[in-house]
Every structure is written in structure tokens, then in C-alpha cells.
Amino acid sequence: MNIRISGGYLKGRRFSVEKSSTLRPTMESTRLTIFSVLNSSSKSITEESVFIDLYSGTGIMGFEALSRGAKKVIFVEKNKNLCTKISDNLEKFDLIAKSEIICSPVYSFLNFKNIKASHIFADPPYRFKEYNKILQQIELNQFLNNNGVIILEMDNNSKEFVYQKELYDFDDRSKGGTKIIFMKRKSD
């Protein structure tokens, strides 16, 4: 299966990914919506951006961020075969120097890595129920820089997520059967 990068200097370039019934890459129209919202809300990807792609799968969101000029992308994926495929594709586009692949469960990464990110994207497996646990770990370990944004992708019918209105400003969008939630830390 091939995936096409939708924007930036690699727009239109394709890379191969594992074909799997459990792997569901973020659709191109959803990716375009995400980056359009980021651009219109002054949270666009810049040469200073550090983008974390949690539950990377194919790595497409990280590739989109790199193509749009991110300084660094950290791919977090527990499946070793997918990590290898991401690495192969990074090499294909000469992006190894601007990326890091963490082949580990997301919770292990969130418990031990000390990184400040401008953008954190999470698209966990379908029917995932622990969005709030991810947010707690991000908050507890201070992964997000002061002006950063968290982007969650989930099923449109997901009821497991509880908005933390005291900590974050929210913007959410629906695209087909997908809900995208943008979370920005409230200003003091």
C-alpha cells in the first residue's frame, strides 16, 4: 500500500507502508484539515517545531510535519516492523537527521522521555479508551511547551474523552467518521 504526502516540499511524494487490517493511516483529507486548522490558528509548523507523533503506525503525520518544515519529529510506535518501515521511508527522503524513532509503547515513552514539543499528535488504535490518561502523562511530565498544541484523532462516536476545560482551550472538527480535537493550554 502507498501513501501520498499532502503538503509541503514533499507534496505528492509517495511511500510504501505495511498492509494490515489493524493499521488505519490518517486519511489525506483529514491531514489537510489538521494542517489547515494549525495554519489558521497561528500554530503552524515552523523550522522551530518539534512534533511528536504518538501511535505513529505508518508515520504519515510525522512525514507531513517534516514536509512542512518541522525542525524535528519524534515517531513513537511499539510495533518493530512499523518502526523499521518508518526508518526506511525516512531514509528514502533523506530525513533521518531530523527525526527520532522510539520503538516502544506510548506510555513508556511518556513516562521517561524529557522533551518539550510544540505539537503532539495522537491517533491511538480504534476503540481506544484512555485519552485522558495520555493527557495526564503529557501534563505530568510537561511535554508540551507553553505555546504548544495537542491534536487528538478519534472515532466521531467516541465517548471516552472528557474535556479538561480548566487546562485547555478546545477546537474540534468532524470529518466523516473522524473527530479531530485541538487542545491549546490556556493562558494565565
Image (cartoon, rainbow, N blue to C red):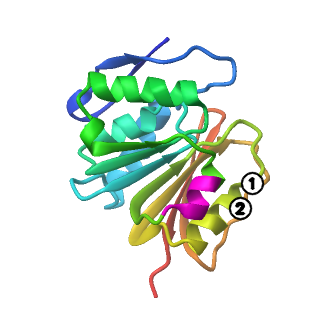
- Classify mark 2: helix, strand or loop: helix
Q: Main secondary structure of the magenta part?
A: helix
* Circles 1 and 2 in contact, beta carbons < 8 Å: yes
Vertical position of residue 174 compared to residue 28: above or below = below
Please state which of residues 108 and 181 is positioned toward the viewer in this rendering: 108
Q: Which residue is mark 1?
A: 130
Vertical position of residue 148 compared to residue 102: above or below = below
Q: Which residues are magenta?
A: 108-113
Can you see residue 98? yes
The residue shown at (69%, 24%) is 22
Image coordinates of residue 164 in percent, x first then y, are 66, 71
Please state which of residues 27 and 133 is positioned toward the viewer in this rendering: 133
Asked if residue 84 lies left or right of residue 94, the reply is right
Image coordinates of residue 24 in percent, x first then y, are 61, 26
Please state which of residues 118 and 29 is positioned toward the viewer in this rendering: 118
Crowding near the residue tagged with mark 2, few <14, some 14–19, many ≥20 C-alpha atoms within 10 Å: few
